[in-house]
Amino acid sequence: MPKDLPPEGNQVLSNAERQARYRARKAGQAGTIIRYRRPADRRTRPQRWHDAVAELLALQAEYTAWADALPEALRDTATAEALQAIADLDLSDLADIEPPRGYGRD
C-alpha cells in the first residue's frame, strides 16, 4: 500500500476498495494531459510544393494589401519597409516550377 495513504479502519483494503480509491484520486487531479498523435501528411511532394507556393502567394497578397492600407504617417517606418520588401518579391518563378515526380514516374 502507498505510504501516503493510511488505511481506513483496522482492516486492510480489498483490491476493489484500493482500486476505487486510486480512481477517485486520479479523477480529482486537475491538469491531466491527453496527447493524441498528429495524423500523417498523406500529400505527395508535388502537392505539398504547390500548396506551399499557393500559401506564399496568398500571404504576399495579404501583406501587399496591408502595405497599401498603411496610413501616410507610417509609410517611412520599418514595418512599411518590411511589407514593401515582401510585396516586391517575385514569386512567379516558384509558381512556374514543376517538381519532379521521382522514381521513374516522370
Image (cartoon, rainbow, N blue to C red):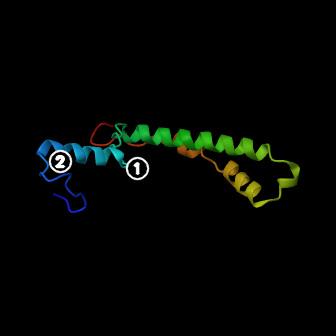
Q: Is residue 103 left or right of residue 93?
A: left
Q: Quadrant of residue 2?
A: bottom left
Q: Residue at x 67, y 51 (%)?
A: 86
Q: Quadrant of residue 42?
A: top left
> Which of marks 1 and 2 precedes in the sequence?
2
Q: Amino acid at mark 2?
A: Arg
Q: Nearer the viewer, residue 43 or 35?
A: 35
Q: Residue at x 24, y 57 (%)?
A: 5
Q: Nearer the viewer, residue 37 or 96?
A: 37
Q: List x then y, in percent, for residue 34.
A: 34, 45
Crowding at mark 2 (Cα within 10 Å: few <14, some 14-19, many 20+): some
Q: Residue at x 37, y 37 (%)?
A: 43
Gap in angstroms between the C-alphas marked 2 and 1: 23 Å
Q: Nearer the viewer, residue 38 or 10?
A: 10
Q: Which residue is mark 1?
A: 31
Q: In which quadrant is the N terminus drawn?
A: bottom left
Q: Is residue 3 left or right of residue 98?
A: left
Evaluate whether residue 64 shows in this view: yes
Q: Nearer the viewer, residue 28 or 51?
A: 28
Q: Amino acid at mark 1?
A: Gly
Q: Residue furthest bottom?
A: 3
Q: List x then y, in percent, for residue 18.
A: 17, 47
Crowding at mark 1 (Cα within 10 Å: few <14, some 14-19, many 20+): few
Q: Which residue is mark 2?
A: 18
Disc 2 + disc 1, Cβ < 8 Å? no
Q: Which structural element holds mark 2? A: helix
Q: Which structural element holds mark 1? A: loop
Q: Is residue 68 left or right of residue 95?
A: right
Q: Quadrant of residue 105?
A: top left
